[in-house]
Image (cartoon, rainbow, N blue to C red):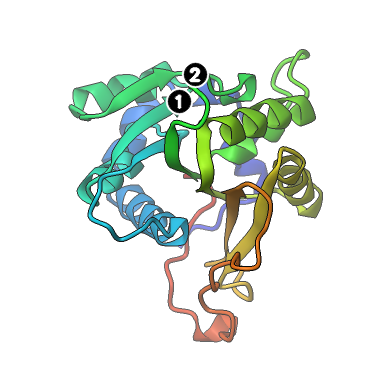
Amino acid sequence: RRRVSMSARPEKQAPPDIFYNETEARKYTTSSRIIEIQAKLTERALELLALPADGISKLLLDIGCGSGLSGETLSENGHHWIGFDISPSMLDVALEREVDDDLLLSDIGQGLCLRPGTVDGAISISAVQWLCNADKSCNEPRLRLKAFFGSLYRCLSRGARAVLQFYPENPAQLEMITSAAMRSGFSGGLVVDYPHSTRAKKYFLCLICGPPSVNTTLPKARGEGMSESDDDSDDEENNT
């Protein structure tokens, strides 16, 4: 399968609202491979979110919701959600697909405009790394991460979780994102699935709204004991 070089990362080509134009948004949403990947990543994020199995529908955020592929999985699991995305074209496709829940055109680097303590949980699939790019002279990544994580912390109910799957470009970017979250008041940390596989490795930042407690433990990563030769997971391109 085609391997994607770091230079092909979408966030290195253009800002998200420009990269995901009408053509790219439709191509993204009609790719059976991307649909499958998004569903798998969202199911894993929901698992890590560890919502109570009480049969009650929760209000979740889908941060960087795109055309609603990940939100579809949230709906199938019985939850209501609010989707944020900066690409008008992606949201237009979501509306054409008759997404049931609320969609907001929003730059998450400016913060999430929601009432404090009203949200039961949040997921984000392949979006947070975009905040690390200075697409404009006024966009300072550390300030954008601070605005995002600070507003996310405020809108979550106490003890609620957020699970953010993302593709860090390098260790420095990984540290910058993780540190910004912890400085905003979150506890938790990274869960890295298939850590020994260059093809299947996935980073999930699992955050808890509030300080750590004696009962707080990070979920177990998948594939920790596997070597790359043992792994038969999909060879996923880091461009979803």
- What residue is disc 2 on? 106
Viewer-proximal residue among 162 and 196: 162
Q: Which residue is located at x 41 percent, y 60 percent?
A: 44
**Residue at the extreme right:** 172
Q: Which mark is residue 85?
A: 1
Please tell me whether mark 1 sits on a helix, a strand or a loop: strand
Q: Is residue 214 above or below residue 21?
A: below
Q: Is residue 238 visible?
A: yes
Separation of disc 2 and disc 1 at Cα? 5 Å
Residue 89 at x, y percent in the picture? 37, 19
Whether residues under marks 2 and 1 lie with C-beta atoms below 8 angstroms apart, the answer is: yes
Quarter of the view holding residue 176: top right
Q: Which mark is residue 168?
A: none
Residue 235 at x, y percent in the picture? 47, 65
**Sequence-earlier tag: 2 or 1:** 1
Residue 119 at x, y percent in the picture? 43, 35
Mark 1, Cα crowd under 10 Å, few <14 / some 14-19 / many 20+, is: many
Say whether residue 171 is left or right of residue 42: right
Q: Is residue 37 above or below residue 150?
A: below
Q: What's under tag 1, amino acid-wise? A: Asp
Q: Which residue is located at x 55 percent, y 85 percent?
A: 229
Q: Quadrant of the N terminus?
A: bottom left
Say whether residue 102 is left or right of residue 115: left
Residue 201 at x, y percent in the picture? 57, 66
Q: Which residue is located at x 32 percent, y 43 percent?
A: 58
Mark 2, Cα crowd under 10 Å, few <14 / some 14-19 / many 20+, is: some
Say whether residue 230 is left or right of residue 137: left
**Residue at the extreme left:** 98
Q: What's under tag 2, amino acid-wise? A: Ser
Please tell me whether mark 2 sits on a helix, a strand or a loop: loop
